[in-house]
Amino acid sequence: MLELYFWTTDNGYKARQMVEESGLDYAIRPIDLTKREQHDPEFMKISPAHKIPAIVDPDGPGGQRITLCESGAILKYLAEKAASDLYPADPVARIQVDQWFIFGSATFTTLAQQYGLFFLRFGEDVPPAKKHYEATLRDLLGVLDRRLGESEYLAGEFSIADITCYPDVHIHGIGGIGLDEFANVRRWHDAIEARPATGRAWGPH
């Protein structure tokens, strides 16, 4: 059984959505960031940069036990392990998934987290930073909205590209800026929210 080291962050929910979509059996191992449990030396043997999510798979390639951190790596690994269409084998389809998956992981999430830092977690009000990151997040939502005006999902079919973007849209779009200006993103968000695996992933832990 997989072990998922998890906390209720955007990246944590990415991994939990992916493991639910994969259909693989798993157990949650909470890592309470508010108590700095991510710095526990035993956890850092699994995640050297003291970040969640992380997984332990006792039945990895060749039957070997593997540990894996970084949400993007986890999503790709689980999709391939489950032989899932969420990371397609077709090379042309995979190119499209990779493009939007990397955009989501490297650009969208990274900048959305800065929005969350200054609007939700920073100890003082910094209006210039808030103005900058709100404009940045609106621009990124516009990128997604234009793409989703052309395609039902980011890479055509539902994939890891959608899973990597959904948590930040849910947290900072629905819960922050709002999606009134981004009708295509709202349609996409609601379709993913309605998936049974999404409901389970965002449920009790």
Image: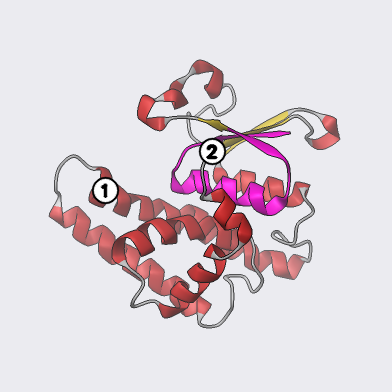
The residue that disc 2 covers is: 53
Q: Label 2 vs label 1: CA separation?
A: 21 Å
Q: Is residue 101 visible from the viewing direction of this image?
A: no
What colour scheme has been applied to the protein in the rendered image?
Answer: secondary structure
Q: Is residue 175 above or below residue 155?
A: above
- Residue shown at 56% from the left, 45% from the top: 71
Q: Amino acid at mark 2?
A: Pro
Residue located at (51% from left, 50% from top): 202
| Magenta residue check for 7 | yes
| Amino acid of disc 1 | Leu
The magenta-colored residue range is: 1-28
Q: Is 66 on the left-hand or right-hand side of 184?
A: right
Secondary element under disc 2, as helix, strand or loop, is loop
Quadrant containing the N terminus in the rendered view: top right
The x, y position of residue 144, in whole percent, is: 46, 71
Q: Residue at x 64, y 64 (%)?
A: 97
Query: Quarter-wise, where is residue 132 in the image?
Result: bottom left
Relative vertical location of residue 162 with respect to residue 109 in this rendering, above or below: below
Seen as rendered, the residue at the extreme top is 41
Q: Count numbered badges in the picture.
A: 2
Mark 1 burial class by Cα count in 10 Å: few <14, some 14-19, many 20+: few
Residue 42 percent coordinates (x, y): 55, 18
Q: Which residue is mark 1?
A: 120
